[in-house]
Image (spheres, helix red, strand yellow):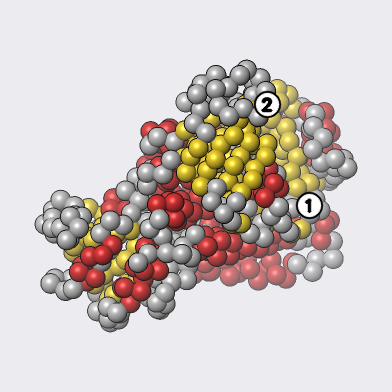
Amino acid sequence: MAEVPTPATEALPTSTEVLIVGAGPAGLLLAAELRLAGVDTVVVERHARRPDFCRGFNLNARALDLLARRGLADRFVSEGWQVPNAAVSGLPVTFHLAGSHTDHPFTLGIPQTRVEEILEAHAVSLGADIRRGHELRALHQDDQFVTATIATSTVADTPTVATGAGEYRVRAAYLVGCDGGRSTVRKLAGIDFPGTAATRHTLLGDVELADPAALPFGATDGPGGTVFAIPRPGYVRIITADQDPPADKDTPVPLSLLQNAVDTALGRHVELRAARWLTRFGDAARQAAEYARGRILLAGDAAHIHPPAGAIGVNVALDDAFNLGWKLAATVRGTAPTDLLASYHTERHAAGARVLANTRAQVLLAEAGTEAEADGRLRPLVDLLTRVAAHPAGNRAFVETVTGLDTRYDMLPDGDHPWLGKLCPNLALTTDTSTSTGTGTKTSTKTGATDLVTLLTPGRGVLLDLTEGSDISESARGWGDRVDVIRAACPDHPDLRAVLLRPDGHAAWLQTTAHDHTDGIQQALQRWFGP
């Protein structure tokens, strides 16, 4: 999908319900989620077109499970390649996804650029207004609106509220910064970004090898370090340590610098040529102190940066957007309970902190036994964790922790069912005949076989009533405009009587034959869907 910058001469609307800054994976998925709920959404992106290079190449099992809840996963799976393992750094163990709690027991190899193209097409099909070549310059918020000053890539006159050559203002009920680790939104909002500065830097280059046989794929150790060679279509991605980074870490990386670093690490010459992308990255780990301040919110790298261990970056960004979308939409529509939007920070800040801890731990493990950890203090820990990871249960625990498959949010009322607060598995269902509540909202799809992800595709809450003749369905009568009540049978789980699902697919309340918590359904409905 080719993109072109929005012409500055177009009559651009100067108000919207939500303004998103940044058209990366988080911003595009968030735009789609908001449009699914009918929220007016504008996305501004300072780059006139998507870059030629590709930052990442994977979607993990958790991200695919989330995308499946909107009917999107198959679009990605059909174009990628499946690897039955999870990306975990620092231990000499293969981490298998088979047997883990996921509908997608594989890592999907797919370029991030293609992920963005698919998400953008989806958002645009739902009516999102995406403006490329438009850069946030200033913002101001009060208790009702956020006003953003946007500069276009041209100085031509714009038939909007002009503030200068090529500038216009947009007023929004909410503004979300999805604009990366150096987020302009975060800086303009004055949100602190505490954490640890980078202590080590790495060079990355997408290049060609003059002699493809000179460097095997994978890790190659030499007298001066290690070089990683990752195959890509028509080129190879080279990764090695930057032994002497400049004071200004933004200094461009010439091919000669990468060439010298590779030769030094290997102790021999391996000719690199035809560079497509050259960059430098560090192991900094930082997290925004607040994911929400007033009417300004952060998601994705704007909210957290971390070492690339585990290849988790784009996946946690999608997780942020999926959590935020339905909550922000309900808040804009006026149907949300007063603290629903605040739960975005509560849930995703804690999840982000775990990501930072997990990635930093993998970096430490990877350094064990190297010159960076010459005294070998970490080697016993590596040995212990290697033995744990070699055990099937330990292997699965590592996989689910690093990929986020173990994500669980606190629910009210709380309980001990293993699904409560977690992403509910994709249940196979047989629906009953279609009936209606007093509000006219259908409580079932057509009679026949279906599954949970299909029921979640519209982006609404779902109450599964798996009983015969109980009053569970009646409990949700007052929420018919926000929650779909589905009477069905679930033969694979005969002990399950009812499940309330948030729009993101996390189980908010359950009833089983062993745990009759009928009184908790009203509390859960009010907690997540308002009075």
Which is nearer the N-term, disc 1 or disc 2? Answer: 2
Residue type indicated by callout 1: Ala
391, above or below 152, in the image: below
Q: Position of residue 246 (x, y in %)?
A: 87, 40
Q: Which residue is mark 1?
A: 198
Let me know if residue 225 appears in the view: yes
Q: Position of residue 212 (x, y in %)?
A: 67, 28
Horizontal relation, residue 263 to residue 356: left or right: right
Horizontal relation, residue 397 to residue 256: left or right: left
Residue at figure coordinates x 37%, y 64% from the top left:
530
Residue at figure coordinates x 85%, y 40% from the top left:
248
Let me know if residue 27 appears in the view: no
83, above or below 474, in the image: above
Observer-nearest of 382 and 164: 164
Residue at figure coordinates x 42%, y 77% from the top left:
414
Crowding around mark 2 (Cα neighbors within 10 Å: few <14, some 14 to 19, many 20+) is few
Residue at figure coordinates x 27%, y 78% from the top left:
518
SS class of the residue under badge 1? loop
Q: Which residue is mark 2?
A: 164
Viewer-nearest of discs 1 and 2: 2
